[in-house]
Amino acid sequence: MKIYGMTAPNPKRVRMFVEEKNLEIPFETVDLAAGDASERFGNRSPLGRLPVLELDDGTLISESVAICRFLELEYPNPPLMGVGALEQAEVEMWNRRIELGLFRYIADYFQHTVPFFKDSVHQVPEYAEAAKASAREQLAWLDGALADRRFIAGDSYSIADITAQVAIDLGTPSVITIGTGLKDLSRWHTEVSARASAR
């Protein structure tokens, strides 16, 4: 088993998930910008995206949450996607809320402002500013949600916390940060950032 990845948010999500599971799966870095997608990486990812999990029999699984779901089912402890139908649904609900709200807006701001993406994304500065404003609204909303819970989806650390942390950490160089008034979000971020998987 091997995971192909790079220094980017979605491969980071999978790496953190693997570390939280205490698994030893080798990671191979792929530099898509240097032509690895066609020369060394081959056709392992039809859409040219990372991460990709390659099983021992050659089966390929792409998309970060699909990889995490496979690993969760193969290695259920410690559980990171909930236990039982209700908890699993709640973790999925919160992870999707973070993906479709906070993560998306921060990533959009990043892609529409960073020169690295200018050849692959039609950058729209006006949209970048709107995405930044939406991301800040999502941070305030998440602060309120964390007022009565330790972690994003409840009392247990889960993939929703991984997704939220990766999103927020991506936002830091993009000037989308946790404001001083967001005490519950700050408390949560300090706690999850101290975990070994976050280093």
Image: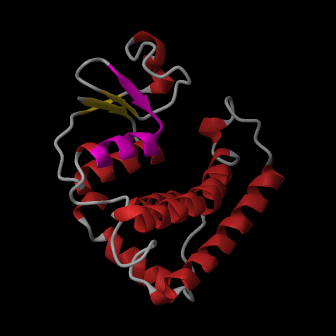
Whether the magenta-drawn stretch holds residue 90 is answered as no
Residue at 28%, 71% in the rendered image: 194
Q: In the image, 40: left or right of 21?
A: right
Quarter holding residue 82: bottom left
The span shown in magenta is 59-73
Q: Position of residue 22 (x, y in %)?
A: 17, 52
Relative height, residue 87 to residue 56 (above, below): below
Q: How many marks?
A: 0
Q: Residue furthest right?
A: 126
Relative height, residue 118 to residue 44 (above, below): below
Residue at 64%, 71% in the rendered image: 138
The quarter in which the C terminus is drawn is bottom left
Q: Residue furthest front?
A: 85
Residue at 49%, 59% in the rendered image: 92
The quarter in which the N terminus is drawn is top left
Relative height, residue 63 to residue 164 (above, below): above
Q: In the image, 126: left or right of 10?
A: right
